Amino acid sequence: MRILWFSWKDKNNPEAGGAEVVNHQLAKRLVADGHEVIFLVRGFAGGTKQEIIDGYKVIRIGGIYTVYFEAYKYYKKNLQGWADLVIDEVNTMPFFCKFYVKEKTILFVHQLCREIWFYQMGKIKGLIGYLLEPIYLWLLSDQSVITISESTKKDLQKYGFESPRINIISEGIELIPISNLEAVKKFDQPTILSLGAIRPMKRTDHIIKAFEIAKKKIPELQLIIAGNNEGSFGAKVKRRVLTSYHRDSIKVLGSVSQEQKIELMQKSHLIAVTSVKEGWGLIVTEANSQGTPAVVYDVDGLRDSVKNRITGWISNKNRSLGLARKIREALSNPKRYATVRQNAWRWSKEINFEKSYADLMAVIEK
């Protein structure tokens, strides 16, 4: 089978995130099974126009805003009629493939963005996105859809997508779960980890405030913030740390290597995630696989990747005070913490790309 995959970014894009982990892992398995896969994605500084990654072809065209029109033009000129199936991956915006491709199409929706627009784009651009999203979703609501969580399925149903057309495939992680929980040594002092690119929709500033509140009851508490902190919001977070009364107990590491990421996940006691919403919350499952449970906000994606008080803790109020209470709850009962930690680790073993790929092929064959 020939599959043409429209996506905003590819695995090697410096801004690649969880969605790109998923499409890469699925694409390389498609190739291993004898299928041909071509990605049409946006370019980036230093990126080649074309590249072969694990057997599939990546064609980079256009920029952040122009990729959608450039992808349309490239398809019309070079790829029309080539594929047996076209995947229109929605990561903020769809490519609207159904209106111009001749082949069968299916949407791949990681998450909807209505709550995110204002955080990432500002008031004016955010308002445009906020108003347009229900309209273009309605236009696409006759399409079959692949998604990765029950939360996103419910979101899609709000905008006219019928349940039988929405297919949930399981998530997967690239990290190999540790073989023995007891072999992992935690930091000497209780430590909260914030890991991932520091962007407005991740609300890293909420984690800092929650840490400060929790530290009043847990004086030895430490906070580590790791991830790309470039840009205006990254600067805001760094300023926030410098003005904190507890700045000596906070480390801001910036971008970290894969080895450092794994070490931080293993040694920290909790990972905190306060995103506006997620498709799944891949970072939660990754941390679970390394023996660290999560404290999270009760939002789409995170309520899918965490089972409250079973594999982690979900704040019933999406405010720093509510998160601080969950941090204290998690760390004040060692026996309960050990049980939750083990549950999270065991569940992470069930979330893998072999199952995700099997789910995808079942959808394609259907």
Image (tube, grey):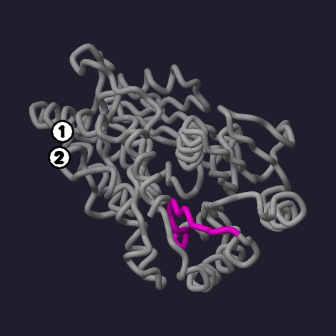
Using the image as rendered, state which of residue 48 and residue 339 is in the foreground.
48
Give the residue drawn at x 72%, y 78%. 99
Q: CA distance from mark 2 to mark 1?
A: 5 Å
Residue 85 against residue 171 in the figure, above or below:
below
Percent of width and height locating residue 77 = 90, 63
Tag count: 2
Q: Secondary structure at mark 1?
A: helix
* Disc nearer the start of the sequence (2/1): 2
The reply, left or right, for residue 90 in relation to residue 179 is right
The reply, left or right, for residue 234 in relation to residue 319 is right
Percent of width and height locating residue 241 = 53, 40
Residue 308 against residue 350 in the figure, above or below:
below
Question: Magenta includes 252?
Answer: no
Q: Tell which residue pokes out farthest to the left in this image.
A: 335
Residue 104 against residue 99 in the figure, above or below:
above
Using the image as rendered, state which of residue 133 and residue 215 is in the foreground.
133
Residue 133 against residue 1 in the figure, above or below:
below
For disc 1, the marked residue is 340
For disc 2, the marked residue is 310
Give the residue drawn at x 81%, y 67%. 72
Q: Amino acid at mark 1?
A: Val
Please identify the quarter of the rendering in which residue 227 is found: top right
Using the image as rendered, state which of residue 182 and residue 169 is in the foreground.
169
Over which residues does the magenta segment extend?
A: 103-115
Give the residue drawn at x 55%, y 62%. 108
Percent of width and height locating residue 282 = 44, 45
Q: Amino acid at mark 2?
A: Ile
